[in-house]
């Protein structure tokens, strides 16, 4: 599958791969671990393969600015759209499958984990995939619930928030109807996950919230009780007419991204009610317009440097007296620091900082 998508822009480039052998001449395969009953339920058999790929990149949650995060999500939508145009469905949207690569003029994102991707068929029926439970679409949750009920089980085994479908035991042959619309919805949940659990750039997580008491608890911890809880919670959320549905959930840092989340949510809710698939082009257009309106945001390194300068001035102003001639040395140091920093900023491709920012110095 990696070979099939190699010419798609922003898919990691496969450099080399090799199968893992448990001992001389014996390749590590799933059938070594499944009993006979389980083997009969699965259409596919997996082989343990290691892949060496380029580029080396940072996880999506290590975004430097909110604009970079939004751009990253837009990139993932475009990658999946390109794959679909070539007849390939990714089927594994999660927070750990997207990366950001830095280059001279900025950054862009990559989509990983194509081993559960499939060729698109007219029927749209595929073997059980490995989409992570909290990011499952309403449609997939409904089908999974039916499959578990058919197997005679009332509850899903204990599932961690990061657990995938492969951890759910279904003891009869099962196929899932999976479309590109499910991928779009899954990516939306990834976006919301970040808005709620993170409160800053470079992977800074919220420290003052209890995960299970947020909206995300209904999409993850409660799943261990019944998949129907997660399905109903997501359906209700997507069709909630209130624009304040996220106000109390999203961290202060991300409050200005709530309008984007709400518009995306409305499109998904309408899609569910009308039984009409939301299109990649609709969501990408939404992101394009939102990105065009986003203001320039200083990356963390630059912000921290300016903060140090401001701190220097506060200390200087609080202690400065006319008779203290050596205070001028501190002032000169602050001015030189500011000048050096702004010269670095001008050398970047980001918008230059106006000269008036030096007046406080």
Image (cartoon, rainbow, N blue to C red):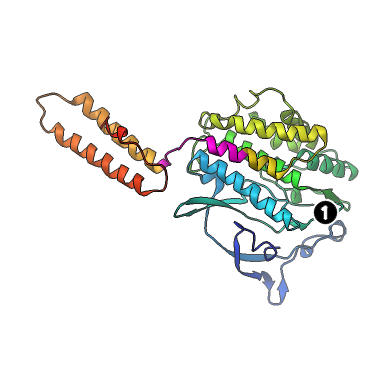
Identify the residue shown where x is 45% and y is 37%. Answer: 296
Q: Identify the residue under disc 1.
A: 126
Q: Magenta part of the protein: which range?
A: 287-300
Residue 48 in picture, x, y percent from top left: 69, 65
Residue 122 in picture, x, y percent from top left: 86, 54
> On the image, which quarter does residue 158 sit in?
top right
Indicate the quadrant containing the C terminus: top left, top right, bottom left or bottom right. Answer: top left
Residue 25 in picture, x, y percent from top left: 71, 77
Q: Left or right: 327 with respect to 286?
A: left
> On the image, which quarter does residue 23 sit in?
bottom right
Q: Of residues 4 and 194, which is closer to you in this image?
A: 4
Q: Left or right: 178 with respect to 352?
A: right
Residue 92 in picture, x, y percent from top left: 70, 50
Identify the residue shown where x is 79% and y is 35%. Answer: 272
Q: Of residues 119 and 304, which is closer to you in this image?
A: 119
Q: Left or right: 56 with respect to 217?
A: left
Indicate the quadrant containing the N terminus: top left, top right, bottom left or bottom right. Answer: bottom right
Q: Of residues 148 and 294, which is closer to you in this image?
A: 294
Task: Answer above or below: position of 315 versus 349.
Answer: above
Identify the residue shown where x is 31% and y is 43%. Answer: 341
Determine if residue 99 is in view: yes
Verify whether residue 315 appears in magenta: no
């Amino acid at each position: 599958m990696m070979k099939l998508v190699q010419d798609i822009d922003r898919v990691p480039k496969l450099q080399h791969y090799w199968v893992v052998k448990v001992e001389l001449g014996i390749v590590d395969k799933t059938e070594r671990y499944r009993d006979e009953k389980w083997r009969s339920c699965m259409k596919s058999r997996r082989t343990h393969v290691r892949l060496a790929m380029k580029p080396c990149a940072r996880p999506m949650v290590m975004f430097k600015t909110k604009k970079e995060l939004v751009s990253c999500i837009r990139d993932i939508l475009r990658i999946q759209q390109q794959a679909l145009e070539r007849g390939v469905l990714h089927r594994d949207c999660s927070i750990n499958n997207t990366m950001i690569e830095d280059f001279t003029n900025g950054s862009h994102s990559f989509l990983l984990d194509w081993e559960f991707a499939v060729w698109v068929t007219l029927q749209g029926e595929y073997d059980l995939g490995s989409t992570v439970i909290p990011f499952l679409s309403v449609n997939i949750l409904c089908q999974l619930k039916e499959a578990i009920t058919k197997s005679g089980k009332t509850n899903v085994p204990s599932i961690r928030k990061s657990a995938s479908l492969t951890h759910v035991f279904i003891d009869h042959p099962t196929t899932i109807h999976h479309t590109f619309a499910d991928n779009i919805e899954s990516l939306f949940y990834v976006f919301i996950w970040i808005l709620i659990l993170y409160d800053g750039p470079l992977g800074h997580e919220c420290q003052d919230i209890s995960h299970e008491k947020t909206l995300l608890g209904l999409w993850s911890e409660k799943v261990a009780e019944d998949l129907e809880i997660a399905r109903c919670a997501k359906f209700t959320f997507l069709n909630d007419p209130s624009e304040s549905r996220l106000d109390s959930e999203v961290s202060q840092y991300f409050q200005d991204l709530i309008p984007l989340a709400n518009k995306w949510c409305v499109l998904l809710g309408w899609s569910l009610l009308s039984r009409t698939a939301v299109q990649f082009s609709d969501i990408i257009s939404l992101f394009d317009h939102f990105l065009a309106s986003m203001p320039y945001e200083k990356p963390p390194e630059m912000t921290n440097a300016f903060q140090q300068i401001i701190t220097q001035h506060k200390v200087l102003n609080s202690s400065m007296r006319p008779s203290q001639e050596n205070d001028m040395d501190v002032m000169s140091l602050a001015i030189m620091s500011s000048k050096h920093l702004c010269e670095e900023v001008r050398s970047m491709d980001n918008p230059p900082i106006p000269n008036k920012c030096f007046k406080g110095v």
